[in-house]
Amino acid sequence: MEAQNPVIQISNLNKEFVSKQGFERVFALKAINLEVYQGEFVCLLGPSGCGKSTLLNVIAGFSEPTSGTLIANGKAISDPGPDRAMVFQEYALFPWMTVYKNVAFGLELAGKADPEIRATVNLWLQKLQLQDFRGRFPKDLSGGMRQRVAIARALAIDSPMLLMDEPFGALDALTRRNLQDELLRIWQELGKTILFVTHGIDESVYLATRVVVMTYRPGQIKKIVPIDLPRPRDPNSAEFNAFARQLRELVAEEQLARKSHEPKRP
Amino acid sequence: MNGRFKNEKQTLQGVHSRDIEHSAAETPRREKAQGLKPFLAAKSLILPAFLVLLWGFFSTEQFREIPILKGSVIVDKLSNPQILPPPWIVLKRWIAYASPLQPYDKTQGTYLQWLFSGELPIDLWSSLQRILTGFAIAIALAVPLGILMGANQSIYDFVNPSIQVLRPIPPIAWIPLAMLWFGLGDPPAYFLIFLGAFFPILINTIGGVRNVDSIYIRAAKNLGAKRIALFWRIILPAATPQILTGIRVGLGVAFICVIIAEMIAVQSGLGFRILEAREYSYTDKVIAGMFTIGLLGLALDYIITRLNGYLLRWHRTLDQAKN
């Protein structure tokens, strides 16, 4: 695996914000170096405000880095594009389109022929058990079903990688586990590269091949923890808990840093 | 692994059925709130029936003979049919107003033509065609201009000051100019209706385009949308709810404008008819005309609500508002 060219190559990446008052410069991301290889499942883990979503947005092309280089699929990133399909926490389905149309949208933009679009959409609707909901509008679906549609939409455009920004954050525990299993099944079947932002420690141990722990302001990579547990992983096993404990300690340090950083509330 | 997968599928089906139940429970509520049913329900007829009874009572002998009120100003005013004609007289006048003036004559045209040859159908049609014409012109100009202004900052900066100066002028204040420019008849009425409907539609269209949630733009760009697709398939549909709000408000203003225009600048239509009736002291006809205006307004609002409901069947807040 290490011999291949990385799918995502980030070197010396910085992202600065100027604070609202205009005096303070905040490093959202500082000196990020990361390589992600074909077929990896990388979780970005850290407390909120650590810049993990910012990093994902920079990779997606939604925001520009202050300095550094960023290469995805062998090309420098400048704009958002369908070679880096994204799944948002807020689902971001188009509410005026039916489930079918949402999934078909990216394919229509790519100028695919109608029969091909139909076949591809049907395939993904089937894979995510959405075929009975093809004519529904997003408002008629539960959160879990909406996120299924968002995943189907991202997969339908056949991007080599999937960027996921806390996709299961708003779901209840049971639905979340179902979708995690489903995502793993698809990942194993297709060999896509997944970059997954989360603040859930158990979630990252359950899913990832590598967990990237980030620091709180400036957002740096604190540690990269490879998770070499066999699958399916048992969240109750001792090995699983050892990893979870290690990550929890790493994150807790950053949580403390965050608390001391925040202005005290009266 | 196989067993696990089976299990997982079952749970998934659990999720599905929950969804179906959820939406099945929603449907009847939506139907109940829509359409004319609320107007026809017995409960909603109590108050109108009571008001008509009260009105009828004020117009009777018995009311005039109540000892305390006898000879008072109130009785004197209310029992005068010039001031408050009783409901049955108004109804009679209404029927006469709606009926053909001449007896049916084969040589003059078809039966259907004869049936709609009364004053009321002709007035109704004159008013309606004025609203529709002025309103159509307003939509045709305000929606594209609003989209341009909402999407392009320099166009907005260029046009907005003029809009802000013209917008507060009530359409009624335009009547003298409208008559000078367009004379009497339909054209000044079209102009006033257009003016009344134009600004609400324009302002809401600008707002709708500007307020498109950036998450949709990001998701669409991520899927490969470029400018044209972004505009037609994301920005425009996302702005539709607010554009339709503008159209609905605009229709209400257009309706006021048509009646006013007909009272001043035109010699036909419902607004003209009630002023004409007042001049002949046909108070019953004034009231019959007012009811006709009210019913036309109700019908137009009903049509636009149904249209809204269809165009925004995807829209979540519309359902919530109806419930």
Image: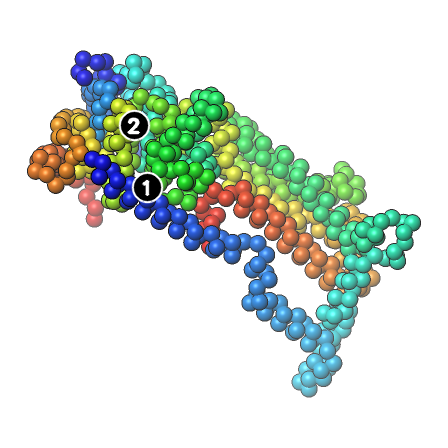
Q: Mark 1 lies on which chain?
A: A
Using the rendered image of the protein, determine whether residue A31 is visible from the camera's viewpoint: yes
CB contact under 8 Å: marks 1 and 2: no
Which quarter of the figure has residue B186?
top right
> Which amino acid type is marked by label 2?
Leu
* Local secondary structure at mark 2: strand
> Which amino acid type is marked by label 1?
Gly
**In the image, what residue occupies the spot 35% across and 37% down?**
A129
The residue lying furthest to the right in this view is B107
Q: Which of A90 and A161 is in front in this view?
A: A161
Q: Which chain carries label 2?
A: A
Instruction: For label 1, count other residues whose C-alpha is less than 10 Å away and answer few (under 14), some (14-19) or many (20+).
Output: many
The residue lying furthest to the front in this view is B2
* Local secondary structure at mark 1: helix
Numbered label attached to residue A144 = 1
Please give the count of numbered marks on the rendered protein: 2
Q: Which of A55 and A127 is in front in this view?
A: A127
**Position of residue A170 measured from the top left corner of the image (x, y, whole percent):** 29, 42
**In the image, what residue occupies the spot 68% across and 76% down?**
B57
Numbered label attached to residue A163 = 2
